[in-house]
Amino acid sequence: MEVKTTEAPKERSLNFVEEIIENYIAETGGAIQTRFPPEPNGYLHIGHAKSICLNFGLAERYNGKCNLRFDDTNPVKEDTEYVDSIKEDIKWLGFNWAVERYASDYFDQLYEWAVELIKKGKAYVDDQTQEEIRLGRGTVQQAGTESPWRNRSVEENLKLFEEMKEGKYADGEKVLRAKIDMAHPNMLFRDPILYRILHTEHHRTGNKWCIYPMYDYAHGQSDSIERITHSICTLEFDVHRPLYDWFIQELGIFPSHQYEFARLNLTYTVMSKRKLLQLVKDQVVTGWDDPRMPTICALRRKGYTPASIRAFAEKVGVAKRDNVIDLSLLEYCVREDLNKVAERRMAVIDPLKVVVTNYPEGKSEIFSCVNNPEDEAAGRREVPFGREIFIEQADFMEEPPKGYYRLRPGGEVRLRYGYLIKCEEVVKDEAGNVVELRCTYDPESAGGGSSDGRKVKGVIHWVSAADAVEAEVRLYDNLFAKEAPDDVEEGKTFTDYLNPNSLVVKRALCERSLGEAKVGDRFQFERVGYFCVDKDSTAEKLVFNRTVTLKDTWAKLQKK
C-alpha cells in the first residue's frame, strides 16, 4: 500500500514524534491512525488544544486518520454537555475526526476480555475496601501485601464478577483487580483495579451497566480495537505505558503503542479541571466560557482565532520534558493573526469632550478610512466628523512630562484620519476635574498637511459626539496575579492568588460603523487593543471583550 506523506515545515527540524512516525511509515509502508481521547467531564482548555493540534495535525500531515474517542468510563462526572462542547471546540479549531467513538461502545468487549483474564488466572475479585487496597500497595521503598482474596479460584472469581455485573453488590463492596506483582517497582503493577461498582446512570448506556472499567484497563484496549498506531499522550502517562503494554500482550490483541510528550503549562493560570470547576462553582468566574478562563470556549469568546491557537501550538512545539510557556507567547500569536484579519475602528474608552470652536456649528463631514492596512480587500469605511468630538482622557495632560506628544494646553496634535487641533482652553468642574477642552482646528490640515507646512508628532484617535455608539467594554487581565498559582505557599490555596483587577468594565464611545457589529466580530480599536463583540450584546447595548492589548511583551523578551 502506497502512503503519501507531507514533510514537516522546512523552517524547523522534525520533532521526536514526527521522527517516530516517519520511521514507522518507512518500515511498514502503512498509514498512521491517531486519536484524541478526552474524558467528557469538563470543558477543554488550551492544553487540550495543543493535543488536538498534535493528534489531528499529524494525521493530516501524514495522510492518516484521527478518531475522536470519548473516555466515558466514569458516569459520576460525565455529561452530554461536555461531549457537545468538546466537539464544538475541535470543529472550531478547524479539525474533523475520521470516526466518533466512545469507550462505552466497547463495554461488552472489555467485559469479555476481563473474563478472559480471570480464566487465565490474571485477575481476581477483591473484597477489600478502597483504603485497605491503598495501604496494601505499600510504598516505593516497601513491597505491597497480597490481598486475602488474591488466590480465589477461577470459578469463584467468574461467579463473583458476573454477580457484580448483575448488580448484586453495593458500590465499593467489591472490585476486580489484575493479578500481577505486589512487589513490582512500578506501583501501577501492584494488582491494579480493572473494574469498580457504580450504580449510576451512564449518559449513553443508561442503567445497562453497574460496573465500569478503569482508565488504565480501558484505554489501551480501546486503542487496540480502533487499531491506533500511535497513541500520543502527555508525559504524566509515561509510567502507565508498561501497564498499557501488559494488557495488550496478555490479551494478544492489536499492538497499539503509546508515546508521551510534555503537557502544556502556561503562566498566570491553572490547567487542572478540578481547579477550573472550583472557579466555576464558587462563582469566581461567570462560567466555563468566562474570558479569563484558559478554556477553548473562553478564548473563543474573548476573541481568539483558530489560526492563532494553531500557531501557538506550532510555536510551543513537541518536547519530552515539561516546561512552562509564557502567556505572552499566546498573546503574540493572536496579535499576529488579528493584525492581518481584524478591521480597524476608533473607540474612546475614557471619554473627554472636545469642542472645536472654529468649526462651523451644524456642519459635518465624512472621512474615508482604510479598514485594514494589511488587507486591501477589506476596503474602506466612512467616519463622520463634527464640531464636538470625544478623545481619551489619557491623551490630554495639563502638565505633561518631557517626551509627551499628545494634547496639552497650547499644544497641537493630529486627529487620526483628520485635522490638526490646538488646545486653547481647559474647562473644569467644581472639583477641579477636566471635563472639556476647547480647541481650534486648521482647515487646511486634512489628509496629513497643514496651512503652513508644520509637522506635528502626536496623533490621537477620536469619535464624533453626534454619531457615537455607546458600548460596554470589558477589559480583561490575567485571572491570577501570581505567575505560577499552582505553586502554593504554606497555609494558602491557589485562589489566594486571584487578581482583583482581572476585569474592569468601562463605558466607551465608538465610531458609528461599530453599531452594525455582530456577536463574534473582531476589531482593532486603534491605539487601544483588539476587541471582540460579546454574546451578552443586545440591540440596545453593544458589549466588547478585550482580546489583547497592542503591547507585545513576548517580542521584547525575545530581543533580550
Image: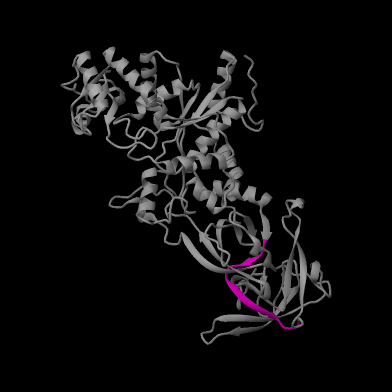
* Residue 121 place in picture, x, y as percent: 26, 13
User: Is residue 353 covered in magenta?
Assistant: yes
- Residue drawn at (63%, 18%) of the image: 3
In which quarter of the view is residue 178 placed?
top left
Q: Which of the 4 image quadrants contains residue 211? A: top left
Residue at the image position 63 percent from the left and 29 percent from the top? 8
Q: On the rendered structure, is 24 left or right of 367?
A: left
Q: Is residue 60 magenta?
A: no
The one of 162 and 497 positioned closer to us in this rendering: 162
Percent coordinates x, y for residue 405 in the rendering: 67, 69
Could one spot residue 182 in this view of the protein?
no
User: Does residue 189 lie above or below 345 as drawn?
Assistant: above
Can residue 212 be seen? yes
User: Relative to residue 257, is residue 134 depicted above or below?
Assistant: below
Task: Name the one closer to the observer, 75 or 332.
Answer: 75
In this view, 62 is above or below 326:
above
Q: How many labels does the image show?
A: 0
State which quarter of the image contains the N terminus.
top right
Above or below, 292 against 384 in this view is above
In x, y percent, where is residue 56? 55, 32
Residue 402 point in image, percent of width and height: 63, 70
Q: In this view, does 162 lie to the left or right of 215?
A: left
**Residue at the extreme left of the image, as rendered:** 148
Taking depth in this image into account, of 186 and 196 the one nearest to the observer is 196
Q: Give the range drawn in magenta.
A: 345-358
